[in-house]
Image (cartoon, helix red, strand yellow):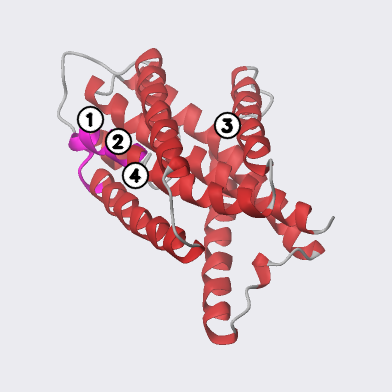
Amino acid sequence: MEYERTSNPVLQERAFEAIPAATAFMSISGCVNKAAICLGLVFLSAAFAWKTPYASIEELMGKGMLFSILAFTTALLGIFKPNLARVTAPLYSLFEGLVLGSISLLFERSYPGIVTQAIALTFGVFAAMLVVYKTQLIRVNERFAIGLFAATMGIMLVYLANILFRLFTGHGVLNSSSPISIVFSLFVVSVAALNLVLDFDFIARQSRRGAPKELEWYAAFGLMVTLVWLYVEILRLLSKLHSRR
């Protein structure tokens, strides 16, 4: 059974239907190559942010906030203008790399070695989910897609509630290293990982349907959004575990 729902805000059917039919078509290998380019750009800009001198933690956080705004703006443009993906996907990767480099440096200052662990775990989970998808250990069907969508939306609502709670009380429940916070982070990492399976399947289905080749950049962009989310959540989980030592 075909289904239309996916948790990724980028990988939506309407984006792939918005581009007129073409003579060149999207392929899995093409998407992989574009995703590899985007990932390389993320690493390059993250390394640049990591090595850039800063006078204080406040300055580093300020730069991270600026980069976040640029990444978010570019992501929105990419979502609403899929035909510009060949431009917005690389730009998003560069800006997001600057964000990740700044965030990672903050965590590394508090917990030396945590960034290497987070990167290794992220790629490990990515590889594991690819194997899970290829071997069909998890059957991607409508029930799975709807359940994962509901879980992802639930997480977003909890995030929002935590932000509001922190604004009014000055304390964030999810930022602590309590057992409840750690269990929640484990749940979020699991949901983010399963979203990769859904992304793989969505891209494969669009390729089989003969989506235009220019959407390979858009598919790579969508995959990067999930991968970035997974890395950040793994980094947060590791920081909570380190703080309990």
Label 2 and label 4: CA atoms lie apart by: 10 Å
The mark that comes first in sequence, 2 or 3, is 2
Is residue 118 a member of the stretch shown in magenta? no
Q: Is residue 146 left or right of residue 67?
A: right
Magenta stretch: dominant secondary structure: helix
Residue behind mark 2 = 89
Q: In the rendered structure, which amino acid carries the disc numbered 2?
A: Ala
Question: What number is the disc on residue 86?
Answer: 1
> Could you tell which of marks 3 and 1 lies nearer the N-terminus?
1
Marks 4 and 3, how far apart at CA: 32 Å
Q: Which sits in the foreground, 214 or 175?
A: 175
- State whether residue 183 appears in this view: no
Give the residue pinned by disc 4. Answer: 95
Identified at 60% across, 85% down, the residue is: 169
Q: Residue at x 42, y 62 (%)?
A: 59
- Which mark is in front, 3 or 1? 1
Q: Helix, strand or loop at disc 4?
A: helix
